Amino acid sequence: MKIIIVGTGYVGLVTGTCLAEIGTEVICVDVDQKKIDNLKKGILPIYEPGLEQLVENNYNKGRLSFSTDFEASVKGASVIFIAVGTPPGEDGSADLKYVLQVADTVGTYIEDYAIVVTKSTVPVGTAKKVKAAIAAALDKRGVDLPFDVASNPEFLKEGAAVDDFLKPDRIVVGVESERAKETLTKLYQPFVLNGHPIYFMDIPSAEMTKYAANAMLATKISFMNDIANLCELVGADVNEVRKGIGSDPRIGTRFIYPGIGYGGSCFPKDVKALFHTADDYKYNMRILKAVDEVNDDQKFVLFKKIEKHFNGDLKGKTFGMWGLSFKPNTDDMREAPSLILIDELLKAGATVLAYDPIAMEEAKHFADKRVIFVKDAIDAVKGAEALLLVTEWPEFRLPDWNKIKSVMHGRVIFDGRNIYQAKTIAAEGFTYYGIGSQPKTAE
Ligand code: UDX
């Protein structure tokens, strides 16, 4: 079975590499010549644990190859995955330009039956458009070839994507024909030897499943952020409340951690895209709109605490920022809450010293040029008035407080992810601010 993956971004590269890992012949195609050249040299466009090794192994074994020649690659392919970007348009709805360009190229060059699978997160109804674009291109050629479209959303978490692909909780596939179902069953069977299900369903339901999953997870987070903010006002501690509710299995312990807002390439974009789809159908998704709004506000929560602590006077003060990426184990800076915090601090006349274990190079493309990037966590707090914990990388969990005190000027910690115990921090001589709890002054 020859597989083509179009788009070597996050999803495409992980998908292609993991499919090659089970012994399939995979060609990853991209229009970006530099990206393809780099991949051939083993240089990856993203950081993802375990991926580099897998790419190298499969490339060396000849199962995985990289090309910019889409037309040539398409010939003889049984399954073509579309994994190109769907950037949000001006109004927040997903832009399908690249997806439909791929469909057109497929229709222009296929020579035999193929299944065209959308892997990118696309609005409900996209597979239909893909099908029409392929049919139109075939028509132009005056050929009548059978083909199928399918929808196979991914549920990969950045930082754990390889594992998520190789050992998925479930695989969701929307199909229209038995033939497509049979081929995709064969392709995915090796990934569900653990007994986890492959759910075959109609295409609109598969497309909807992806949005519903992300929207539900984002809702949990925004809901908890709202609860956290209220906890602060009524004198409760969200860390206790979280434990109290999470032990009810109907609620569950995961994705109820309050913080400084969700970021990344999926939640912000998918939440917006889903309520835009609803708007198109004249249905008002009130909950999701609020989820988005709460998240936008939550990204300012840490700054507001800082401002209040220093009585609105941040001019000339230095702040040490730990963590920049939108979450640990990734260098992804898209929609990272750190960016808002940086902007607000700089606007207020403060200096920001920043450190991230992996994302610093990437952050340089995103953050204001005035940020000072430093080589380690200790350098970030040298002379700082406060330490700002922004991304909960494991290496920040148990720092050497004495060392920190020996270089830091102030004695206050703003913990945007609630990774420290207020009591412990206060005993170390720092004033502690978390999310959803009362500040605790140094002892
Ligand atoms: C998400 C989905 O989990 C994944 O299934 C989908 O395919 C893509 O989108 P990802 O964007 O990699 O994956 O990140 P995830 O681990 O889900 O975290 C998203 C954001 O939510 C992060 O900013 C994280 O810090 C935040 N978060 C998560 C919280 O604020 N609280 C939580 O309890 C969990």
Image (cartoon, rainbow, N blue to C red):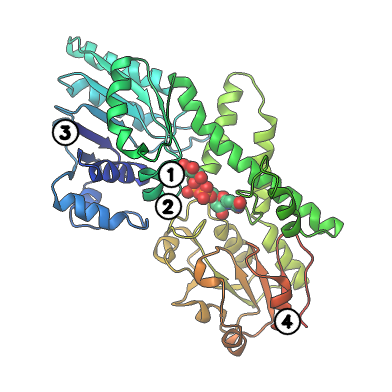
Q: Choose between 22 and 413: the one closer to the eye.
A: 22
Q: Is residue 324 above or below residue 228?
A: below
- Pointer 3 and pointer 2: residues touching (CB < 8 Å)? no
- For mark 3, give the secondary structure: helix
Task: Classify 10 Å Cα crowding around label 3: few (below 14), some (14-19), many (20 and above).
Answer: many
Measure how far apart labels 1 and 2 are at the Cα level. Answer: 7 Å
Lower sequence index among marks 3 and 1: 3
* Residue at 36% over, 57% down: 47
Pinpoint residue 338: horizontal percent, then vertical percent: 56, 60
Q: Is mark 1 within 8 Å of ligand 1?
A: yes
- The residue pinned by badge 1 equals 156
Mark 3–mark 4 CB contact (< 8 Å):
no
Label 2 C-beta lies within 8 Å of the nearest ligand 1 atom: yes
Q: Position of residue 149 (x, y in %)?
A: 33, 21
Circle 2 residue: 160
Q: Secondary structure at mark 4?
A: helix
The secondary structure type at the circle numbered 1 is: loop
Name the kind of residue labelled 3 in the image. Answer: Ser
Which label sits on residue 73?
A: 3
Mark 3 or mark 2: name the one nearer the start of the chain: 3
Q: Does 276 sit left or right of 65 as displayed?
A: right
Q: How many marks?
A: 4
